[in-house]
Amino acid sequence: MRISRTKSKIRVKAAQFDQAFERGEEFEMLDLESTRVHSPVQRINLDLPKQILHQIDNEANRIGVPRTSVIKLWISEKLSELRSA
């Protein structure tokens, strides 16, 4: 299995991990916080009034994330609300 080290962590590709798991190999440490899920993305353009954009930016700065993360989070939360209603 080909691995690369980054900042004293071992990195493996998903296919390599799956094969090792299927062989029953044990993992001493599995860092789930740095894993990423790659979902298909569709870019859109969105025109917003400056006042709303300013409010979004204030919230993004308050919690320390990019503006787009706040927008995606809020849309996701609203869709979850609608599904459970």
Image: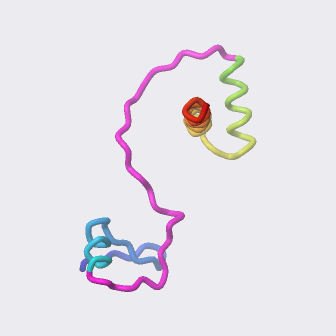
Q: Residue at x 38, y 37 (%)?
A: 41
Residue 6 drawn at (x, y percent): 43, 73
Residue 31 drawn at (x, y percent): 50, 71
Up the image or down, 52 lies above or below 28; here it is: above
Quarter of the figure with residue 72: top right
Quarter of the figure with residue 63: top right
Q: Which residues are magenta?
A: 23-50
Asked if residue 20 lies left or right of residue 56, the reply is left
Up the image or down, 15 lies above or below 77; here it is: below
Give the camera-side residue of 8 and 82. 82
Magenta part, dominant SS:
loop
Asked if residue 61 lies left or right of residue 77, the reply is right
Quadrant of the snapshot with the N terminus: bottom left
Any magenta on residue 84? no
Residue 9 drawn at (x, y percent): 45, 77
Q: Residue at x 75, y 42 (%)?
A: 62
Quadrant of the snapshot with the C terminus: top right
Any magenta on residue 30? yes
Residue 69 drawn at (x, y percent): 57, 39
Asked if residue 46 lies left or right of residue 14, the reply is right
Q: How many numbered dots are placed on residues in this image?
A: 0
Q: Residue at x 68, y 38 (%)?
A: 60
Quarter of the figure with residue 80: top right
Up the image or down, 41 lies above or below 27; here it is: above
Asked if residue 17 lies left or right of residue 29, the reply is left
Q: Residue at x 50, y 63 (%)?
A: 34
